[in-house]
């Protein structure tokens, strides 16, 4: 999966990204998972519940969730 086109090079270098599955029906709701700059998820590092949620979201892309997007995560 390619990085989000609006992602800055500074964000890519920092290495803090998430893969976001936006809900198609509930504005502002999404499932997000830590990933690398290319959107790869390390399934072995996810908890059982997070792994189930990730597989659920991935299976329902186009039905309940939009295509996932890689976004840089900025500390507040």
Image (cartoon, helix red, strand yellow):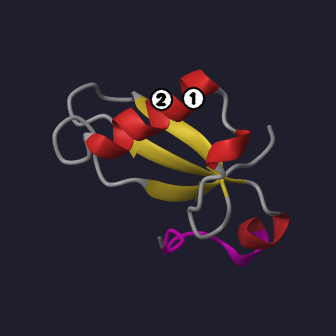
Residue at 39% from the left image edge and 29% from the top image edge? 28
Residue at 68% from the left image edge and 62% from the top image edge? 36
Quarter of the figure with residue 67:
bottom left
Residue at 28% from the left image edge and 47% from the top image edge? 66
Q: Nearer the viewer, residue 25 or 39?
A: 39
Q: In this view, does 21 lie above or below 2?
A: above
Mark 1 crowdedness (10 Å alpha carbons): few <14, some 14-19, many ≥20: some
Which stretch appears magenta?
2-10
Report the quarter where the C terminus lies.
Answer: top right
Residue at 30% from the left image edge and 29% from the top image edge? 27
SS at circle 1: helix
Residue 46 is situated, as x and y percent measured from the top left of the image, at 66, 36
Q: Nearer the viewer, residue 59 or 30?
A: 59
Residue labelled with disc 1: 50
Residue 52 — which label?
2
Residue 13 is situated, as x and y percent measured from the top left of the image, at 81, 72
Would residue 10 be found to the left or right of residue 17 on screen? right
Mark 2 crowdedness (10 Å alpha carbons): few <14, some 14-19, many ≥20: few
Mark 2 in CB contact with mark 1 (< 8 angstroms) = yes
43 magenta-colored: no
Quarter of the figure with residue 38:
bottom right
Q: In this view, does 35 lie above or below 55?
A: below
Residue 24 — which label?
none
Residue 53 is situated, as x and y percent measured from the top left of the image, at 46, 29
Would residue 40 be found to the left or right of residue 5 on screen? right
Would residue 54 be found to the left or right of residue 73 on screen? left
Q: Is residue 7 above or below residue 35?
A: below
Would residue 45 be found to the left or right of residue 38 on screen? right
SS at circle 2: helix
């Amino acid at each position: 999966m390619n990085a989000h086109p609006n992602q800055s090079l500074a964000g890519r270098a920092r290495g803090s990204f998430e893969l976001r599955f936006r809900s198609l029906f509930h504005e502002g709701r999404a499932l997000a998972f830590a990933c690398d700059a290319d959107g790869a998820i390390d399934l072995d590092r996810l908890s059982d519940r997070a792994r189930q949620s990730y597989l659920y979201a991935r299976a329902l892309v186009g039905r309940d969730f939009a295509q996932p997007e890689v976004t840089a995560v900025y500390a507040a």
